[in-house]
Amino acid sequence: MIEYRDPITGYMIRKYTDGPERNAKLYFTTENFSVDDKYFYFNKNQTNGCNDGGCYRVDVETGDMTLVCDESYRGFALDRVKNQAYVCKNDNEVYIVNLDDNTMSKVGELPAGGKLTTHLTAADTGRIACSYHLPNKIYSLIILDPGKEPEIVYRSDYRLGHAQICPTDENLIFYIHETEGDAFQRTWMCDVPERYVRPYYVEHPNEWITHEVWSADGQEMAFMKLRGRVMIGDKDGRHFDQAAESEQLLHPCLSRDRKWIVADRISYLGVDVQEGVVLIERETGKQKLIATTGSCKSGADHQHPSFNRAGDMVLFNNPDENGIAQVCTIDLKQVMKDW
């Protein structure tokens, strides 16, 4: 771990990895920190000639790293409340990880021969859900209740992705039609008991909706309306507000109290900008560039910023000189001094 002063914003940044392999934080649609905020988690690609790839736990203060699971595991995601995580081995064996001691307990199996299309997610009841590509090539939404057999609750010819069960409602799963670009109607909700699906944000012509995430309490969703508008909608998809607008924003993430938004600023759709991380005060709309970064080599190397649980630190990817993600944090207490 090293500390450096951002040459443009002037704030101190902690950098925990230095490549040359890709080291990327978890996606912004899952918690990234342990419940006490002592640790965060990231995925490391295997170094050439070394069997060291996998998901690591990092001590925020010291930078000490511990391997939690190797690259045979996928879909690692943290629980919103409990100090545990969920992960899938061999694409179908589902485990709960006790983050106090990193022990694993198998809780079930998804259909053999398929593949996750997103990380695992869980509601506060313990129900696990994911989008899954079945071996017969049909896409699906699957739930897994501890101690029970998995259930396929929806099937589709569309490529389903970004499935996120509502953190406080086990009967509601958000998902998207994944086109890797614009979609005619991207955002959907699945009612689990009724096996009924409906659009979440109903798109009009020339609207480009993307990068959606639940609030930690499951009451709202944040998402982007390109170019650069952060939208927030209620749980039912009946009311939507524009929370912020700025140049080239992407990947909005809400703090747990829903008072703050953090997003990356990225060169895309033919517009080049100084890439970095932007902090937004929801009530006032005030925003500030708090960290600058290198330019991303790929979508996987985007900054994907997210808050710790206390809301006083942001974890983000900082692409290196080759555009490869490396993991950094910024302590927001220094930002608040001159907010």
Image: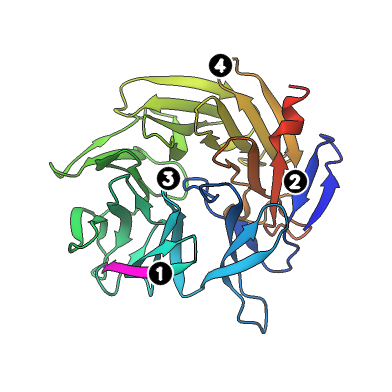
Cα distance between the residues tagged 3 and 2: 28 Å
| Among the two numbered marks 4 and 1 on one chain, the one whose residue lies closer to the N terminus | 1
Badge 2: residue crowd in 10 Å (few <14, some 14–19, many ≥20): many
| Among the two numbered marks 2 and 4 on one chain, the one whose residue lies closer to the N terminus | 4
Badge 1: residue crowd in 10 Å (few <14, some 14–19, many ≥20): some
Which quarter of the figure has residue 305?
A: top right
Q: Nearer the viewer, mark 2 or mark 4?
A: 4
Cα distance between the residues tagged 3 and 4: 24 Å
| Among the two numbered marks 3 and 4 on one chain, the one whose residue lies closer to the N terminus | 3
- Number of the label disc, if any, that sits on residue 283: 4
Which quarter of the figure has residue 264?
A: top right
Residue 272's place in the image compared with 260, above or below, is below
> What kind of secondary structure does the magenta stretch mostly adopt?
strand
Inspect the image, locate mark 1, and give the three-letter code of the amino acid beneath it.
Met
Read off the magenta span.
Answer: 105-109
| Among the two numbered marks 1 and 2 on one chain, the one whose residue lies closer to the N terminus | 1
The residue identified by callout 1 is 104
Inspect the image, locate mark 4, and give the three-letter code of the amino acid beneath it.
Glu
Quadrant of the drawing holding the N terminus: bottom right
Q: Secondary structure at mark 1?
A: strand
Residue 281's place in the image compared with 293, above or below, is above
Badge 3: residue crowd in 10 Å (few <14, some 14–19, many ≥20): many
Q: On the rendered structure, is 63 left or right of 80?
A: right
Seen from the viewer's position, the closer of residues 29 and 238 is 29
* Residue occupying image coordinates x 34% and y 50%: 122
